[in-house]
Image (cartoon, grey):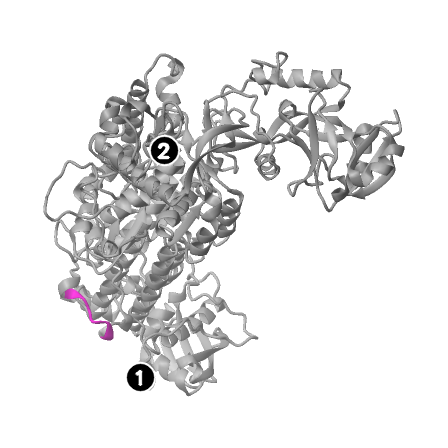
Amino acid sequence: MLLCRIVGVCGSVARWGSRRGVLHPGLSYNLSRCQSVGSSGGTAQPSAVQGKGKYRNSVLLPRTDFPMKLTGQKLLDRELEIQQLCGFSELYSWQRERKAKKEYCLHDGPPYANGDPHVGHALNKILKDIRNRFEVLRGRQVHYIPGWDCHGLPIEIKALGDLGTSGLTPLQIRQKAREFAEGAISRQRAAFQRWGVMADWGKCYCTFDGEYEASQLRVFQEMHSKGLIYQDYKPVFWSPSSGTALAEAELEYNPQHVSRAVYATFPVKTPPPKLATAAEEWGSMAVLVWTTQPWTLPANQAVCYMPNAQYSLVKRGDNAQLLLVATERIANLAAMLGTQLDAVGSFTGSELEGGVCQHPTIPDKEVPLLPANHVTMGKGTGLVHTAPAHGMEDYSVASHFKLPVECMVDEEGKFTELAGPELQSLSVMDEGTDTVISMLKAAGALVREEDCVHSYPYDWRTKKPVIIRPSKQWFINTASLKDKAKDVLQKVQMMPESARGSLLAMLDRRTYWCISRQRSWGVPIPVFYHKETGEPLINKHTVSHVAKLFAEKGSDCWWELPLETLLPPQVLKKSKAGAVSEYERGEDVLDIWFDSGVSWAAVLQDWEPDSSSESTDSPLSWFSLPSALTAESEPRADVYVEGKDQLGGWFQSSLLTSVAVRNKAPYKALVVHGFAVSEKGEKMSKSLGNVVDPDTVINGGEDHSVSPPYGADVLRWWVAESNIFSEVQIGPNALTSAQENINKLRNTLRFLLGNLQGFDPRTQAVDPKDMYYIDQYLLHLLRQYSIKVTDAYSQFDTGRVIRLLQRFITRDLSSFYFSIIKDRLYCDPEDSIGRRSCQTVLEEILDGVTRSIAPVLPHLAEEVYLHAPGHDEGETLFRSGWIKSSSVWQKPGLEEAVEGACAIRDSFLSSIPGRNSAEYDLIIAIEPGLFFELMESLQEEPTSSTSQLTELMMSSRTTLVSDMPRDLPSDALTSRGSFLINLEGGVIREESSYSVAAMPSSLSRCHRCRRYTSKSPDCLCPRCQNVVAGN
């Protein structure tokens, strides 16, 4: 046959790309090989052969007890049964113990232990689990330890409720917070297990574990010894509602915040020297400033200008007042003030140097005019009021020009006595602002007051505004780490790539990181202070000793143990410090972003298995790294997978701490997914009533007619088919669609299982070289499918996995292969080579499709595997490997033969729209050449009703000739086309024309197979006669 000759010609060709038939441009032609036949069908359909008749029992219809659909409580019970039967809870430990050549480490970013599981958790955990299960199937040893972020104010606030911290000791606060966090962890863990997330759930990490806290202190000490952690008095974001300093990552910005902005004047007391002569003619003048925070004006130390900008002295048209403003702001200011502003003189900003102004509300206070780079012209007057105690840029100006940093605001956000009797004890954001504005008005310095809607930072825990105030805190010098961090990021793969720019921009904005918090529920900063001088005592000796205590007893010992135990004589001696009685322990705790940001050190770096002991009291003693990671002195995770909010959070804190200690990123790749939102694209909110509870999705709501139980696999399908790199919508429509898609998949799998009843691939499989060409072709398509699916999983593109699956099932199977093989499958002898060939391919398809969707739908996959033939009882899919496709399935010339026949078939079907193809005899004429010989491979005899070519045509009988007969019947329907054969990248290339004549069949319909292949109406076709006689 020609295919054998083509194999010889192509020699070492192992695989061909997609080569579709090319038709003559003038022919109207359906390019899909999957064009369906007429409504009555072209082969024996189930509906046809299930009718009453004496041959019914001789037809091999599908038989399986695999249910077509599972709903309601039966679905929920079945999923839980599958988890139990198939060892979901033991899978992680099993794969950790098996031998593997490669490891895959996905480091789990710890979710916050402050509430019930939500759809954001589902999106994140299921996405991770899909990848981990894929890697297990591929034979890799997966390293995945779930964790929880357990410290911080949100937990403290929820744990204490209305009680607050009043009257409670730190240990009492910590006990209540720990109990609350443990409860949240328990609920979240149960939900993650129900979703089918693979892990050893008895061995998780928590940031309140003593061993974890000890690792955290070791990182702290390493950074402190390098001078990267220091104590300083500088402005920080401060939350009066929480009573603590905050880092940038702990802020939420409210774009609708309303501030009372003011335009105020600072009278010029000493004109700039370069403008002294002109100033004598101008007379009295004032600098005009604009601020959205009037409460900061009492702390003003300077007015800043842009050195290279143009400034003008303008005269108001309504009262002749002289005001100094930026030239490009004159038009806007005139419109705002509702008066003409006439320029009296203009000059550059640098000429303002040396000028001195009078403070508007403090008579004896003078403030200089100073140059600054942070001055902008987008809003205001081009001259910036500068209060070093209440602004980061202001503080930089003060540091450069040695200005005082006076703080007049306490920890509750109220003015202190330094602000004067009029302001003392007033809340700066409320009545304090009112009073400052009144003072400006009384001094004649208030030009205008207005409401300003703008973005303003809020405490992410209490949802209340924060302020900037100076405080003595502990900081990380991120400015010295940024360049190295940017450098190592270039070697990190980012998905999507656009996330890289966001992460770099956030790094640029972060000049320092405040890591101290004035709370009780956290890891204590291991510092002691001299009672008289206030000098901190902290070094490798003190920190190492405290870390050892934390590892043994947990960080509660910071408050439980006497100072003599925390600071013993030998540590004092090594530290060259005085007596223990001269010191007191610090009260601040570490920022929770530092807590979670050092998880690489606690979870990756410190997990060295101890072969000398099977057990230990250490909370993290059961952790172990894959051999490839333990061999690496400074291991890294293959990937971190979290939401886009972590670009300024965990991704960044992990990067900075790892770069500080190890000079490298803790991850090789970052996957940044979007947030779960409603179907309308809105943020989920109880007030909007659009919150989707994953527990309700799985188990249903109170009214199952409104909120039916979908089970865990529907939730997992929703994650998989979504575009995770944008906002991910969820709601009734998305869930119903997911359920319908899974049911369609079930039906396909049920068809496959039903037709494999009694088939054992271990003893009855047909070798690919002996198969029908259409069967070999499906193996070829299965091979292509498996390669594409594997690539999609590797790229975290689960949406592409779903699309590939649906296309393969719809286009290649249901609309093409299944419609062609049903006659052979149902009506051929049970043990015939043709039927066994078909069953061999169906088993490979069942196995390949089931494995390909197993990472997404583990419950369904294992359920199918329980019914599938060819493996021992008790064996599970996830312990048996990935898709077992073979490169030999991609046979040179096979694709051209089958797709050439499909091109002819489509021409034929397009000539009989809406009619039954089985009612027609065909004459196919192809000019001599390679294409003709390919078709001869499918039909050796000139005319046949049982050839592979006839099966592909789905006709009654097919005749293959090189020239179309001249004496065609008058009712013959003809069509023409051409097909391009392209082998070996164009080395073998030939375009051939063909023509098709379709005529109503002269044969009768067989009562058994329903094909028009019988010689008379009252007898069976030869094939069916032999089968019935054999039975």
Q: Is residue 942 above or below residue 483?
A: below
SS at mark 1 in the image: loop
Of the residues shown, which amino acid type is indicated by label 1?
Answer: Gly
Q: Residue at label 1?
A: 11
> Residue 138 in the image: x percent, y percent?
26, 58
Q: Residue furthest bottom?
A: 928
Mark sitting on residue 112 = 2
Q: CA distance from mark 2 to mark 1?
A: 60 Å
Indicate the quadrant containing the C terminus: top left, top right, bottom left or bottom right: bottom left
Residue 213 showing in the rendered view:
no
Residue 269 showing in the rendered view:
yes
Whether the magenta-drawn stretch holds residue 768 is answered as: yes
Task: Determine which quarter of the picture holds residue 838.
Answer: bottom left
Indicate the quadrant containing the N terminus: top left, top right, bottom left or bottom right: bottom left
Q: Which residues are magenta?
A: 764-769
Task: Determine which quarter of the picture holds residue 938.
Answer: bottom left
Whether the magenta-drawn stretch holds residue 311 is answered as: no
Q: In the image, what residue occupies the spot 54% across and 27% down?
A: 469
